[in-house]
Image (cartoon, rainbow, N blue to C red):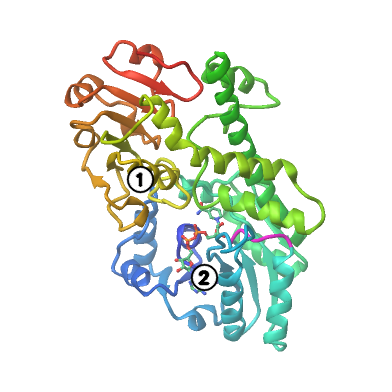
Amino acid sequence: MKIAVIGAGYVGLVSGACLAQFGFDVFCVDHDAAKVEALNAGRVPIHEAGLGKLIHDNARAGRLHFTMDLKAAVSKAEAVFIAVSTPTRRGDDAADLAYVHQAASQIAAALDGYSVIITKSTVPVGTARKIKAQITAERPDADFDVAANPEFLREGSAVDDFLKPDRVVIGTEKKRAQEVLRKIYQPIAMTGAPLIFTDFESAELIKYAANGYLAMRLAFINQLADLCEEVGGDIAVVAKGIGHDKRIGHHYLQPGPGFGGSCFPKDTKALAVTAREAGAPFSLIEAVVKANDKRKLDLSTRVTRMLGGSVADKRIAVLGLAFKADTDDMRDAPALDLIPALTAAKAQVVAYDPVVKPNGVSAFEGVEWAKSAYAAAKGADAVILLTEWNEFRGLDLAKLAKSMRAAVMIDLRNLYSPTDIAKTPFAYHSIGRQAMG
Ligand code: NAD
């Protein structure tokens, strides 16, 4: 089966490579010439475990192709996945569907033989139906169906998540489209993951409901951590205590600096807009959005308080810039709120991330870049742990403290235990636990 994937980003690239691994003939299309050129030269433009080898193996086997030629890729493809970005729209909080509809239009022009056009991008409820109407209007002669097939992979474990998902959700209207998707996902079904066949609307809602719910758990634990800071109690123990309740579970109960990334912030906002526009306001999700935005905006105040009321002229090492570990994705990362606020307050920020490199992001203007955690901490008045990279869990704290001007650690991911830190020279601040030192 020939498959086209439009958009070679985190989702498109991983999906394309995994589908090629299943044996399909996959054409990944992107309009970013530099990206396509890099991929064709064997360079993977994103940091994602296992993706490089998967791309290399399948490209070599002749099953995975990268191109800017959407027409050739779509022609005679039985399935065309739309995996373009759906960022927050400028001016309001809705999902911007400009890329999706542009891709649909280009696909419409290229259709040649029966195809299922599949939305893999996260799109608001109603979008599959709109795409169907759009393609029908633009190409009344085309033989096609539409399917809504949201993706649940997580950056950092994207390949694994795609190959071994908890479930695959497929919204269709037609048996023929169902059969194409059943064939595509057969290798995954064989691992035991359920294929959930449903209508367009349910499929689209499942994605936003999942992200909304997970984001809600994070906002919940973050506010509970704030409460611990005021009244005593250790958020790690409280989370463990509630997590053992089988009705609750342990996932997504880790407090932190506020959720970021390319999904939770934009998807919660878009869900709130959808619900408001539908006349069924989702006040719970609106509260999640508000709480998380505020948490990130207040990060510099939190840090300043921990540093005695002023950061002016302090040298502050920020360890970790990506929104979470194991990815280079900076979209809506807490670092984008914290670092500019610190530099505006005249702190001298030294940044280190294992994979995010100096990238001309304007938010990081004036920031010094270090090549290791130890280099960043040298001469610093405080070190802030902002991303939960594993390499920050096992730092030689004695060595780190010795090289600093003042041994102060602000652990916004609770990577260390206060008991362990008490044996070191560090004054230690974390989230939802009492300060020490
Ligand atoms: P991305 O920005 O990494 O990739 C999108 C790619 O699409 C870019 O390379 C862009 O150049 C390309 N593109 C846009 N319009 C195009 C067109 N008309 N023709 C060819 N290429 C085009 O985005 P992403 O993170 O992969 O996310 C894609 C979608 O998947 C979004 O809707 C997102 O919400 C959803 N999603 C993302 C994740 C994630 O973890 N990143 C997980 C699940 C779902």
The one nearer the camera, 158 or 347, is 347
Residue 330 is covered by the magenta coloring: no
Q: Is residue 105 visible?
A: yes
> In screen coordinates, is 12 left or right of 119?
left
Callout 1 secondary element? helix
Callout 2 secondary element? strand
> In screen coordinates, is 281 left or right of 318?
right
Residue 122 is covered by the magenta coloring: yes
In the rendered image, which quarter contains the N terminus? bottom right
Residue at (52, 16) in percent of width and height: 234
Residue at (54, 46) in percent of width and height: 164
Which amino acid type is shown beneath numbered disc 1? Ala
The one nearer the camera, 406 or 268, is 406
Q: In the displayed structure, would residue 161 be above or below residue 219? A: below
Contact, mark 1 vs mark 2 (Cβ under 8 Å):
no
Instruction: Determine whether the beta carbon of the residue marked 2 sits less than 8 angstroms from the nearest atom of ligand 1.
Output: yes
Read off the residue under disc 1: 344
Mark number displayed over residue 6? 2
Q: Give the mark nearest the N terminus, 1 or 2.
A: 2
**Where is residue 396, by image quadrant?**
top left
In the rendered image, which quarter contains the C terminus? top left
Which range is magenta?
121-125
Residue at (33, 70) in percent of width and height: 40
